[in-house]
Amino acid sequence: MSWLEVPDGWIVQAYRYALDPSSRQRRALLGHVSAARFCFNDMLALVKAVLDQRAAERSYGVADADLTPPLGWSLPALRRAWNARKHEVAPWWSEYSKEAYNTGLDALSRALDAWSASRAGERAGGVVGFPRFKARARSRASVRFTTGTIRVEPDRHHVTLPRLGRIRTHESTRKLARRIEAGTARILSATVTRDSAGRWYCSLQTLVRRQVTPAPNAGTAPHRVVGVDVGVSDLLVAATPDGTETMRVPAPKSLAEAQARLRVLGRRSARQHGPYGPATRRKQRPSQRWRRTQSRIGKAHARAVNLRRDVLHKATTALARHHEVIVVETLNAAGMRRNGGVRTRGLNRALADAALAEIRRMLGYKMRWYGSTLVEADRWYPSSKTCSACGGRKPSLALAERTYVCEHCGMVLDRDRNAAINLARLHETRPGERGPADSGSVAGRGATQKTSPAQAGKAGGREASTPHSHTVDQTGTAAPQGAAV
């Protein structure tokens, strides 16, 4: 059986541990990251040179058969080209693991493939530009190991990685170690990254045998189906089809709370000797005080991220454990932040602080753990504009209106709760089966059923995320993928 195949009863799960590397190991990690970045930049320069050379030859009238041979963009082709030139461009290549160079080549292959697909109109989403060179200050420090010695040590406080040896972990690895000893888990790869605060993390991609744990009192729970509306003031509001509110989680607003400290650190950084001269705008060696200030800025951002992630994990786990069907809205979070420009700067920051897309992503894999079903509403479904009592619809609803007042029946209800009720009435109990008859006036419209794991494929173009398994039209019937609805 290939390690890429996921057998029945198994899932691919990541275990993430903070590392406490020594000074020597920290330098080795930085060296591996730099090697991956160098390989990416060197091969990208070669790809650009070949493309420019072929374009110049075409402008001179050279026949296509006589052009400079093209350079393949697949990972094996890039690896062959790198192995042929590494002795000349990187005579120090043997000092680091081959996986470091494979990390850079894999990133370049994916970037070129995304650019090519976007240019040909085969990739959904925003336009993807041609890959750019990675700078040390702006690129993400990351390296992935797929071969060699990758294991969790029996002492529960060390992991072993190729060419790096035993690295101490900041927390215990007993949960994963017990699964490996019992034969219910197998490590596939390890990815080492560094966050903005300078902390190193090791994410172990693991094949785990996991028994689906049904939700408590499955089938008899009073709140079997809920709709979840997400927002920036309240992170999420969950309600049942009959109008009962089951959960309301206030937004942590960790980034907003960190703004005062970030402003102080930003002003301090501007007064210090930075990497560019204030008059000449030329690169210079920054001072140690400037470096320490940047480290404090990174720690402030890392704390905001950790606080937000903690609230998201607790809320999504509670939803997946206690409900059988959850209906969520599909929001274009990136598009919401991209439109508006400077005049919506406060809203854009609030959207980034809420991380609305993370809720759907976390529910996507957690509900498979507990045997639940996730239903995604259509992006254009008007859950906030529709009255949950009479089904009337408002032509527009400003963001400042936090209370929904129906012009047809006079109902007055919290805006987020009204949207959650409409989403809950949109569910399907099983693939291909409509919801109950008393679901209300908006039942069965604009929902997509999500019951299978992520798979590659086309859904109106090549998607960067998980394609939809089914598309439900306005009559509530499931149409095959690719059919007109």
Image: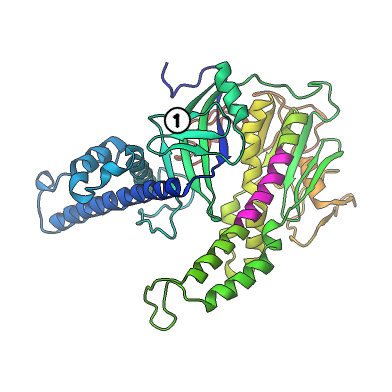
Under circle 1, the secondary element is loop
Viewer-proximal residue among 478 and 362: 362
- Quadrant of the image for the N terminus? top left
Most prominent secondary structure in the magenta stretch? helix
Read off the residue under disc 1. Answer: 150
Please, is residue 148 above or below residue 251 in the view? above
Q: Horizontal placement of 425 versus 76: left or right?
A: right
Residue 196, image x and y in percent?
A: 54, 55
Q: Is residue 354 visible?
A: yes
Viewer-proximal residue among 200 and 347: 200
In reply to whether residue 289 is colored magenta, the answer given is: no
Residue 206, image x and y in percent?
A: 52, 28
Please, is residue 332 above or below residue 102 in the view? below
Q: Residue at horizontal 54%, vertical 62%? A: 295
Q: Horizontal placement of 268 versus 464: left or right?
A: right
Q: Residue at horizontal 74%, vertical 41%? A: 228
- Residue type highlighted by circle 1: Ile
Q: Horizontal placement of 121 versus 242: left or right?
A: left
Total labels: the figure holds 1
Viewer-proximal residue among 111 and 120: 111
Viewer-proximal residue among 70 and 33: 33
Q: Residue at horizontal 40%, vertical 42%? A: 122
Q: Residue at horizontal 55%, vertical 16%? A: 183
In reply to whether residue 315 is colored magenta, the answer given is: yes
